Amino acid sequence: MSNWRIFIFLLLGSNSVFGQIGGDATYQFLNLMSSPRQAALGGKTITNIDYDVSQGLYNPATINPEMDHQLALNFANYLGDISFGTAAYAFTIDRRVQTFHVGVQFVNYGKFDGYDENGNSTNPFSASEAALSFGYARQLGRTDFYAGAAVKMITSKLEQYNSIGIATDFGLVYINDAINFNMALAVRNFGTQLKSYAGQQESLPFEVTLGLSQKLENVPIRWHMTFENLQKWPLGTSNPGRVETDLDGNQTEERVGFLNNTLRHLIVGAELFPERGFNLRVGYSFRRAEELRIVEQRNFSGLSFGFGMKLNNLRFSFTHARFTAASNTSFFGMQIQL
């Protein structure tokens, strides 16, 4: 069986798994962006197989010897003053054993004023979540395929409630060096709660993502195309805020058609000068753009852009992502070769 047939077989097999998105699952922070570079390319890129050690947080199959002794620290002042960040480190034992990866994701929701059921003020409280991951990847025989897996221990504290969970990520990458083409599949957050918040078991934010990327031969650009949430169709539902009312008072709900639902799975991005000391990045998430757009107003939701800069053993990254006219976020990152 050829390499392509193996890849297609695994992809089709993953589509039969049912998962949850949105408010149907807990630990939603696990699907946030892992680095400024990933954020700039649309938010869920899984095909960067190079020095970027933060990529191993999202697709363990991308873990490779080029990440050896690379340490990355990333931070974002997220929406509503939520603090979000990641850290990652990789080390190679030898070329036969390949590379191991350690990562951390955390989110701090800040402090809140507490009130009881009667509206009386109580003590303020905080909320935070974190995950510690261990990953490993290796080549499948002498093929062009690389497989990886990561185990994540998850902890969450929301006011007086605590939860502990465990999850596993699986990844598969196909690399064609002849045409500088990469294809990747990531199956993320397959796991369970070991301890629920209040005795009620909840699902984890399971997700299946497919990615394609290629560096153009005569132009210094690598394009990226990502299909997110392949485990669920459709993604879109009608928005109650977009109900149209005619002169007779008749109401018509928003209709989410086949093309609209298809585009909500798509994220596109491009990186200019991907192998240089300074590069520019841009991305667009159709789902974020559609779900956060304002009727009859252009606010560029879904757009993200940033840059990366290398100075000796240090790499700096910055990304600005548009969500709504009233809310955007900036993502900062630093990677050092120890």
Image (cartoon, rainbow, N blue to C red):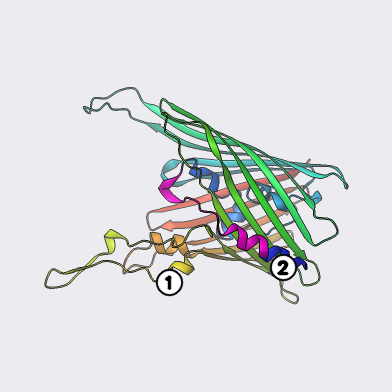
Mark 2 surroundings within 10 Å by alpha-carbon count, few (fewer than 14), some (14 through 19), many (20 or more): few
Q: Quadrant of the N terminus?
A: bottom right
Q: Amino acid at mark 2?
A: Arg
Helix, strand or loop at label 1? It is: helix
Q: Which mark is residue 258?
A: 1
Query: Of 28 and 276, which appears nearest the observer?
Result: 28
Q: CA distance from mark 2 to mark 1?
A: 28 Å
Residue 264 in the image: above or below residue 96: below
Query: Of 18 and 139, which appears nearest the observer?
Result: 18
Across and down, in percent, residue 234 comes to: 44, 62
The answer to which image quadrant residue 176 occupies is bottom right
Q: Nearer the viewer, mark 2 or mark 1?
A: 2
Residues marked 2 and 1 touching at CB (< 8 Å): no
Any magenta on residue 10? yes
Q: Which mark is residue 5?
A: 2
Across and down, in percent, residue 287 comes to: 46, 62
Any magenta on residue 194? no
**What is the magenta range?**
9-25
Across and down, in percent, residue 88 comes to: 68, 42
Q: Amino acid at mark 1?
A: Phe
Residue positioned 24% across, 28% down in the render: 117
Asked whether residue 306 appears in the rendered view, the answer is: no
Across and down, in percent, residue 119 comes to: 22, 28
